[in-house]
Image (cartoon, helix red, strand yellow):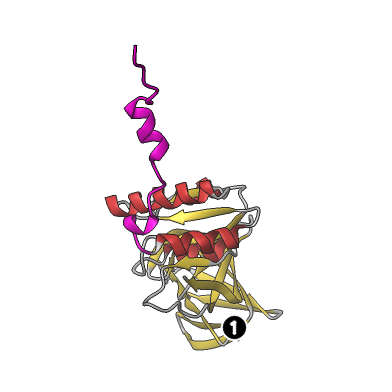
């Protein structure tokens, strides 16, 4: 009796299957994977993505490619609180899949002191860019980042006051408001108030305490908190590293 040794068709299909070319999913994936592996070392890569189908698909593909190379990856989104997934984890690099229209990947990278890897703008790989940023720290040690500026405004200037401390000097501003930006690797502070003419200060570190009325803290045009207590602003030269790949 004639016998055959052909394997079942499902076994042949499994044996012949090859890993999908990442470029067929999205062209920049191959270069982003190589750059993330090179930056990771023993750390973890944070993948920032949007909520649309393409972004989710690309993030999953990148995570799978990194896992194949022995690199751990965690996905986060612009949703409030999503970055808590990164708590107590050494993040070596942040991959930007959200796109240039969102500051969240850049702010997250600066907060974590990790480079942000982003698809190159054209055929040639762009040069690495370093930008100065503003660090915000509360008295309890919470850390945040502003890429452009921070503003503090009182909701009742008639009763409120701000107390500014910098370079050993303390300044009380009734009904005060202020804007903090970073210029030439230092903080540039514009402050004014009720019967207090506008003044510009330049410093590396500024502590601001609010009293007697609610205040609003706005970071990069985005209100993030009712401002109570005190916050310290610090200039961080080169605190954001953008690496197009």
In the rendered image of this protein, does residue 195 appear above or below residue 31?
Answer: below
Magenta segment includes 32 = no
Q: Where does the image place residue 143, in percent across and percent down from the top left?
A: 58, 60
Q: Residue furthest left?
A: 53
Which residue corresponds to mark 1? 186
Nearer-the-camera pick, 207 or 145: 145
Q: Residue at coordinates 40% horizontally, 50% vertically from top-left? A: 61
> Which image quadrant: the N terminus?
top left
Q: Is residue 93 left or right of residue 9?
A: right
Nearer-the-camera pick, 102 or 13: 13
Magenta segment includes 19 = yes
Q: Residue at coordinates 34% horizontally, 49% vertically from top-left? A: 57
- Please state the extent of the stretch shown in magenta in the rendering: 1-27
Q: Where does the image place residue 22, in percent across and percent down from the top left?
A: 39, 55
Q: Where does the image place residue 10, in percent across and percent down from the top left?
A: 34, 28
In the rendered image of this protein, does residue 181 appear above or below residue 52?
Answer: below
Q: Residue at coordinates 47% horizontally, 78% vertically from top-left? A: 179
Element at badge 1?
strand
């Amino acid at each position: 009796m004639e016998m055959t040794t052909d394997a079942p068709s499902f076994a042949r299909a499994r044996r012949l299957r090859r890993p999908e070319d990442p470029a067929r999913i999205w062209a920049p994936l191959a270069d982003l994977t190589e750059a993330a592996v090179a930056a990771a070392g023993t750390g973890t890569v944070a993948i920032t993505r949007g909520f649309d189908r393409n972004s989710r698909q690309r993030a999953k593909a990148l995570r799978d490619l990194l896992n194949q190379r022995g690199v751990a990856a965690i996905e986060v989104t612009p949703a409030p609180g999503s970055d808590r997934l990164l708590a107590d984890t050494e993040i070596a690099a942040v991959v930007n899949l959200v796109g240039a229209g969102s500051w969240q990947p850049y702010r997250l990278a600066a907060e974590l002191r990790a480079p942000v890897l982003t698809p190159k703008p054209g055929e040639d790989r762009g040069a690495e860019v370093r930008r100065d940023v503003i660090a915000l720290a509360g008295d309890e040690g919470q850390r945040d980042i502003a890429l452009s500026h921070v503003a503090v405004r009182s909701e009742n200037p008639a009763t409120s006051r701000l107390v500014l401390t910098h370079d050993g000097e303390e300044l009380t501003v009734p009904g005060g408001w202020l804007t903090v930006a970073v210029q030439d690797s230092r903080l540039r502070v514009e402050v004014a108030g009720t019967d207090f003419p506008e003044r510009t200060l330049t410093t590396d570190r500024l502590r601001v305490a609010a009293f007697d009325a609610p205040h609003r803290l706005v970071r990069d045009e985005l209100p993030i908190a009712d401002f109570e207590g005190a916050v310290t602003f610090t200039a961080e030269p080169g605190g954001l590293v953008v690496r197009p790949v």
